[in-house]
Image: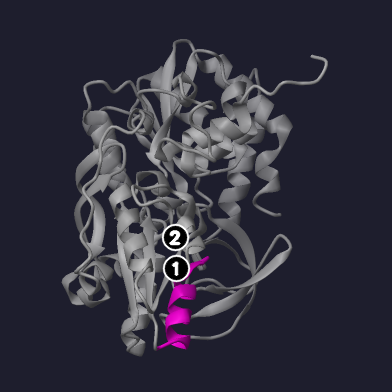
Amino acid sequence: MKHVDEFRDPAAARRTAEAIARITTRPWTLMEICGGQTHAIVRHGVDLLLPESVSLLHGPGCPVCVTPASMIATAIAIAGRPGVIFCSFGDMLRVPSTSGSLNVAKARGADIRMVYSPLDALAIARAQPDREVVFFAIGFETTAPATAMAVLQAEREGIENFSMLVSHVLVPPAIEAILGDTANIVQGFLAAGHVCTIMGYREYEPISQRYHIPIVVTGFEALDLLQGIYLCIRQLEEGRAEVENQYSRSVRRDGNDLAQAAIARVFTVRQQNWRGIGDIQASGLGLAPAYMRYDALLRFSDIAIAPERAGECFSGEILRGLRKPDACPAFGTGCTPEHPLGATMVSPEGACAAYYRYRRPIAVAGA
Amino acid sequence: MCLAVPGQILSIDGGDKLTRQGRVAFAGLIRQTNLAYVPEAVTGDYVLVHAGFAITVIDEAEAIKTLAYLAAIEPEGFP
């Protein structure tokens, strides 16, 4: 596929890794924000190509991982109501909560459907006006324009049997929460290329200046990641702290203005709870007052929201870059994707699941 | 979750500022895709698609520049 294969060229990857080794004179710790990047790094072995002195920490950019378990319990309660069709992205269905997972609820008879786009959920609502269709709106700024558009289309067509359980999260407040933590050891960030495709990277410039930290907007293929790491280390070695754009084929400084306008129209910024991390000020999106009637929490306001329970494994420390998955005593033994103890083992993009899939020592016959 | 896949627009099938859509070809798959957020996109363009929406038109010149930068990274050189 064009725009994929050429960014996976092994010879260019080796050359870039060699260039990284050549310019690195000191130990550096970088963090990639996005779970999709974590997955690509571990899958392609990008981290194994780096000099030992360069360490990659894996950030909180996995929406499935950071969606509060209480929100999943609420989703299950809504899905269990008669007449409800509950629609979700596939990744969310396996995530455990105090009430089990959406998949378990589905097996017990709830009408839960996996959709590829919020517009698929809206199409179900359009086709079945006698049913209440609820969409589980999770994701970062990349996904928010898609859910915003589903609300705007529902409004225009007067589709009233459609609502959303909203748990959207924002990247810059999470970066600031990491940098503001006294335990922080991250010296440079690879910013999430698709979030920046929507939002641009102006909002990262004051963060880079305030904390004197390089932020490189980076893509998702092996060569993108290696070039992002190269640019970040070059800034560190030269004592610079700027926002650079590695992913210029997709990201412009101002982002996608129409997508931003849709987000601004449909949503307002609010405090958000992040699973494993806790509340972060102004780090989430809720429906704006004009669109409250599409809020599933109001439509099903009799459902009590379970309190969030703290203290499940240490996925919170992994999401904040304080530990790596294989430092956990339960990794791969007491905690597996089939029986996850925490969110980072659940989602395929969670750091623990990526390590489990690609880094577990596998016994080889005769070895 | 934030996965976005490049695909090529085969046709644009109308719609307005909320519903503009087209057929987009990915490796081995063709899907109807909402194009409302990329009004500048024309047939033949490559777009990045996330959750049924094209979120950007891939800038071919910038793609070539990135590959050229990488090609210029030599163990002895310094681009």
The amino acid pointed to by label 2 is: Ala
Q: Quadrant of residue A287?
A: bottom left
Q: Residues within 10 Å of mark 1 (few under 14, many from 20)?
A: many
From which residue to which does the magenta span run? A111-129
From what the image shows, is residue A170 above or below residue A262? above
Callouts 2 and 1 close, C-beta under 8 Å: yes
Q: Chain of mark 2?
A: A
From what the image shows, is residue A153 above or below residue A277? below
Q: Position of residue A325 (x, y in %)?
A: 47, 26
Mark 1 residue element: loop
Q: Chain of mark 1?
A: A
Q: Position of residue A214 (x, y in %)?
A: 36, 30
Q: Residue A292: which disc?
A: none
Q: Residue A110: which disc?
A: 1
Specify whether residue A126 is painted magenta.
yes
Q: Position of residue A106 (x, y in %)?
A: 48, 63
Mark 2 residue element: helix
Q: Residue at x 64, y 34 (%)?
A: A44
Specify whether residue A218 is painted magenta.
no
Answer yes or no: is residue A10 visible.
Answer: yes
From what the image shows, is residue B32 above or below residue A178? below
Q: Which residue is mark 2?
A: A105
Between residue A331 and residue A192, name the one nearer to us: A331
